[in-house]
Amino acid sequence: MALEWRVAAVPLTVLLQHRLPRMTDPAEAALAAAGFEVHLSSDGVEGLSRLIMLRPDVIITGISMPQLDGFGFIEAVRRLDYLRAVPILVMSASKSGELKTRARNIGASGWLPYPIDSQQLIETVMTVAVR
């Protein structure tokens, strides 16, 4: 099914991070095709440093990353006043209810199962971005 979403004149900005390009490539392609401005990071430490200059509308993060994992990244972002309200989605192949609960408890806004369904990805990002 072709994507029917197209972001308004001013594109929403998304920080997309995961240690494996094979996890981010499909999501990046879908988001870019829908008109989002996508910035990539492969690690939580790198992602935090990018947030100094980038004020994304939505953050999508993996869990397993070197240096700073997704949980540590979420906790760090939630401690920053200017980013506290930015929605954070966790992208993972894990079906663990425990991991989902942990992510929610520390401030994640939602969970994106992998492999990525492009339509679901765009709908979820648009939904959390307008809250």
Image (spheres, helix red, strand yellow):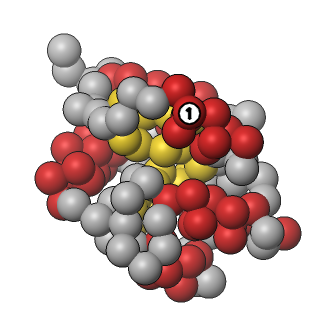
Near-viewer residue (89 or 58): 89
Residue ID at (79%, 69%): 79
Q: Residue 114: x percent and y percent? A: 29, 34
Q: Residue 106: x percent and y percent? A: 71, 50
Q: Residue furthest right?
A: 81
Asked whether residue 8 is in view, the answer is no
Quarter holding residue 19: bottom left
Asked whether residue 115 is in view, the answer is yes
Quarter holding residue 56: bottom right
Q: Up-down: is 34 above or below 21? A: above
Q: Residue furthest left?
A: 22
Near-viewer residue (129 or 88): 88
Residue ID at (53%, 27%): 97
Count all numbered tags in the image, as a single digit.
1
User: If the image is split into quadrants, where does the C terminus sit?
Assistant: top right
Q: Up-down: is 123 above or below 88? A: above
Residue ID at (62%, 83%): 52
User: If the image is split into quadrants, where does the N terminus sit?
Assistant: top left
Q: Residue 73: x percent and y percent? A: 57, 66
Indicate the secondary structure of the residue bearing disc 1: helix
Q: Residue 91: x percent and y percent? A: 40, 43
Residue bearing the label numbered 1 = 98
Quarter holding residue 129: top right
Near-viewer residue (12 or 67): 67
Determine crowd level at label 1: few under 14, some 14-19, many 20+ residues with C-alpha closer than 10 A. few
Near-viewer residue (19 or 35): 19
Amino acid type at circle 1 is: Glu
